[in-house]
Image (cartoon, rainbow, N blue to C red):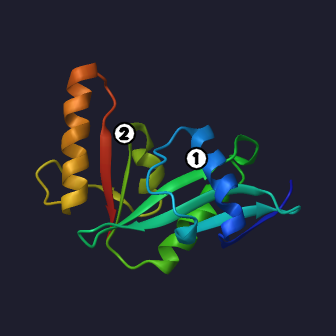
Amino acid sequence: MQAFHLRRAESADQAAIGRIIRRVGINPTGIRWQRFLVAEDGVGRVVGCGQVKLHADGSRELASIAVGEAWRGRGVARAIIQALQGQARPPLWLMCRSVLVPLYARYGFREAGRDEPLPAYFRRVRGLAGWLRRLVRSDQYLAVMVWE
């Protein structure tokens, strides 16, 4: 098994970050390489990434956690999540598909209750996602989670 290491993203990583984000099919908005931590393999290829976004309401979001398919199951996402948590102070929020709630719970995140007060950004996005879910009649939902 090849090793990887984490480092702060550099401007040259911007294209690789964009490719990984698109390949895993997560929200590509708010991608600024300056906020990213990347996982790099032994020959310098970016194999995973993640960031903490700062929103206008002052809330911070763990976001854009993505790992290339060949590197999944090797601890890359875990290393990125834990490193970003180590650099941030609680509360740290995230949004994910409901099927991913157990994954993030392993890192100390808990799902915010439906009646729980949320920062403005997360309240707006959860409202829009709820409206879309009713429109498409999906069993999955957008979960808002917090690490406190």
| Residue 75 visible from this viewpoint | no
Q: Which of the 4 image quadrants contains residue 112?
A: bottom left
- Amino acid type, residue under disc 1 in the picture: Ile
- Horizontal side of 65 relative to 111 (left or right) equals right
- Residue at figure coordinates x 66%, y 68% from the top left: 11
| Residue 142 visible from this viewpoint | yes
The residue beneath circle 2 is: 98
Please provide percent x and percent y for residue 81.
Answer: 54, 64
- Residue at figure coordinates x 28%, y 20% from the top left: 136
- Amino acid type, residue under disc 2 in the picture: Ser
Numbered label attached to residue 21: 1
Q: Nearer the viewer, residue 50 or 110?
A: 50
Q: CA distance from mark 1 to mark 2?
A: 19 Å
Please provide percent x and percent y for residue 91.
Answer: 31, 72
Q: Secondary structure at mark 2?
A: helix
Number of residues whose C-alpha sits closer than 10 Å to that of mark 2, classed few (under 14), some (14–19) or many (20 or more): some
- Residue at figure coordinates x 50%, y 79% from the top left: 87
Mark found first going from the N terminus, 1 or 2: 1
- Horizontal side of 99 relative to 141 (left or right) equals right
Q: Where is the C terminus found, in terms of image quarters?
A: bottom left
Please provide percent x and percent y for residue 66.
Answer: 59, 50
Number of residues whose C-alpha sits closer than 10 Å to that of mark 1, classed few (under 14), some (14–19) or many (20 or more): many
Q: Secondary structure at mark 1?
A: helix
